[in-house]
Image (cartoon, helix red, strand yellow):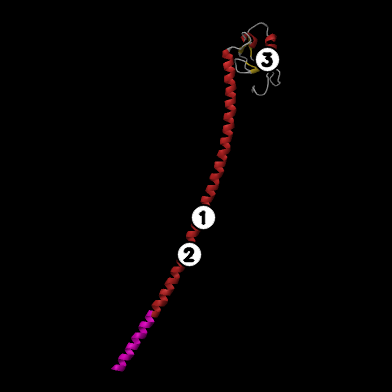
Amino acid sequence: MSDGDGCVHCGKSFKSPVEMTCAHNLCLNCEDDIRKKNEDAHAEEFHCPECHKGVVHQAKKKSGGKKDSGQDEMVERRENYRKNKVEIIKNLEELEHENQKVDEFMRKLNVIGEKTKVNAAQMKNTIIKECDALILIIERRKKVMLSKVDKAQQDKLRAFQTDRKSVV
């Protein structure tokens, strides 16, 4: 039985819920009803309808209208446990939500990183192509300049040879 669902005996929402020593809950009237249906209606102990453990009848545990301090402590612990459980579940759900946000952020970062790698590779290829084109231009200019230097040298050599022939 999930204690938040209702009384296991009558199936309704709890009316004056009583937490038994086995930590299950019943309506106070249902507890009395179960006790009365037992063979010995005056017995202090009956069996929990959920777990079948022997539990002490709530009315027999009362002394002077107050519950046993051990029972009070147990009920208080159980309630604290439930509150802590709810809070922990809520915190876990919030952490899961935050974790999903972090995962999504990491996916976006990975996409950006991959795009950056691709862009860097494209930029590198562009630089290589532009440098290769500049090298070709420089080599062509070098050939043209060397050709002009060779021609100028040949022209000077011819002029020198012509001047020399005319001097002789």
**Residue reaching furthest to the left:** 168
Residue topped by disc 3: 28
Residue at (60% x, 28% y) in the render: 86
Q: Classify 166 as above or below 42.
A: below
Amino acid bearing label 1: Val
Q: CA distance from mark 2 to mark 1?
A: 16 Å
Q: Nearer the viewer, mark 3 or mark 1?
A: 3
Q: Classify 125 as above or below 146.
A: above
Say which element carries label 2. helix
- Residue 35 screen position, x and y as percent: 67, 10
* Start-end of magenta stretch: 149-168
Q: Earlier in the sequence, mark 3 or mark 1?
A: 3
Residue at (34% x, 88% y) in the render: 159
Residue 129 is tagged as 2
Q: Quadrant of residue 42?
A: top right
Q: CA distance from mark 3 to mark 1?
A: 72 Å
Residue 149 is tagged as none
- Residue 154 screen position, x and y as percent: 36, 84
Q: Quadrant of residue 165?
A: bottom left
In reply to whether residue 71 is colored magenta, the answer given is no
Left or right: where 119 falls relative to 20 = left
Residue at (41% x, 74% y) in the render: 142
Q: Quadrant of the N terminus?
A: top right
